[in-house]
Amino acid sequence: MTKIHILGPNPETFLVKLAPLFPEVIFTVGSYRDDFGKNFKLYDVLFTFSDFLSPDSFKVSNRLRWVQSLGTGLDGMIDSPYLDDTVIFTSMRGIHGPQVSELVFMHMLSLSRNYSKAMVNQRDHLWERWPGKSLQKKTVGLLGVGIISQALAKRCKAFDMKVVGITNTRRELENFDKIVLRKELISIVQELDYLVVLVPLDGETLGLVDERVFSGMKRTAYLINVARGGVVDENALITAINNGEIAGAGLDVFEQEPLPVDSPLWSQPNLNLTPHLGGMVDVYVEQAMPILIHNLKAFLNGQNDTMLNLVEHQKY
């Protein structure tokens, strides 16, 4: 029988949906990073989020045939030196647009209206008023123009914002006022009020948003990162905020997750942090289930080429 391990926060929510549909499959669940690696050789299939794996999780992966990411990312999995090209990789690409867009707006509005100050004042029973910044007529740059970015662009236009897409291929897209090439990043940031990071982490994007980008941004501009922590140089970000090169930032992803308790990011002023919540919403299991059901049926029937969101090793 095929054995599938589901690893992540609240894995039982996936189990209760899948187990009745696939009685021929043995499902197990785990919630901790080390839980999977201890029994890795027992499973044919892994359903997981990439941040629930340690670098050595795949050392004893002689039986593994398929990895289904429960998120969009496959970093830490598809690039593992312990897995060969016969292992199938699939992702949840295409379902995160609405909720990640909402989180971006939460950060933009929180920073623009200084909501963190309001929360402190509420705690201290202090009545104090100040003018905030409106999103209306502001320019937002979306670094990456994939599915999530396109969903966000649509919502930005509803707020009467100007939307600039930043990508490797210049093309026309609905709800974007302008598309510029990624090589123009340092010059285009001079026009932006918000820079939102939405690119995957790879060899080209590692450390892409660095001190050169921050030094070119408006002093009143904000950075929002909901992609991968490694795309942004965190030390350069701290320096930029402390030096007044940018007004602040909202981070949902980090170079190291969980964020270490001694990280200077925790106490950095004008910096809003969320613990990688972008895709985590109450309807996520329902969003994911059509892909999981389709792919599992295809896998069990030996129709791997019909699986959704297949990711080729060499393209990641």
Image (tube, rainbow, N blue to C red):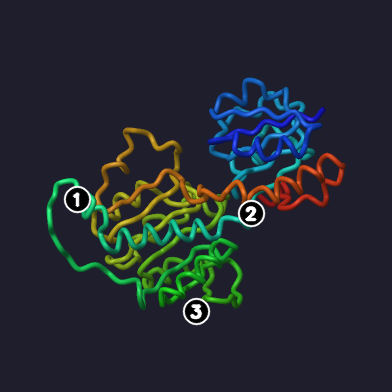
Q: What percent of the width, then of the height, locates residue 24?
A: 81, 32
Residue furthest to the right in view is 302
Q: Position of residue 120 (x, y in %)?
A: 20, 49
Kindly identify the amino acid type of the residue bearing the numbered disc 1: Gln
Q: Which mark is residue 93?
A: 2
Of the residues shown, which amino acid type is indicated by label 3?
Asp
Mark 1 or 3, which is nearer the eye? 1
How packed mark 3 is, by other alpha carbons closer than 10 Å (few <14, some 14-19, many 20 or more), is some
Residue in the image at 24% along x and 67% along y: 132
Count of numbered circles on the image: 3
Along the line of sight, the residue nearer the viewer: 37 or 299: 299
Q: Residue 245 has which mark?
A: none
Q: Image point 41% across, 77% down: which residue?
A: 160
Q: State which tag comes first along the sequence, 3 or 2.
A: 2
Looking at the picture, which amino acid does disc 2 mark? Arg
Find residue 213 and report its horizontal and vertical position in percent. 39, 61
| Structural crowding at the residue carrying mark 2, measured as other residues with C-alpha within 10 Å and reported as few (<14), some (14–19) or many (≥20) | many
How busy is the neighbourhood of tag 1: few (under 14 within 10 Å), some, or many (20 plus)?
few
N-terminal-most mark, 1 or 3 = 1
Residue, disc 1: 122
Mark 1 lies on a secondary structure that is helix
As drawn, the label of residue 177 is 3
Q: Nearer the viewer, residue 315 or 193?
A: 193
Label 1 with label 3: CB-CB less than 8 Å: no
- Check contact, mark 2 vs mark 1: CB within 8 A: no
Residue 124 vs 178, above or below: the answer is above
What residue is shown at x 29% (from left), y 51% (from top)?
Answer: 239
Circles 3 and 2 in contact, beta carbons < 8 Å: no
Q: CA distance from mark 3 to mark 2?
A: 25 Å
Q: Secondary structure at mark 2?
A: loop
Left or right, residue 277 beside residue 129: right
Residue 41, percent from left and from top: 72, 23
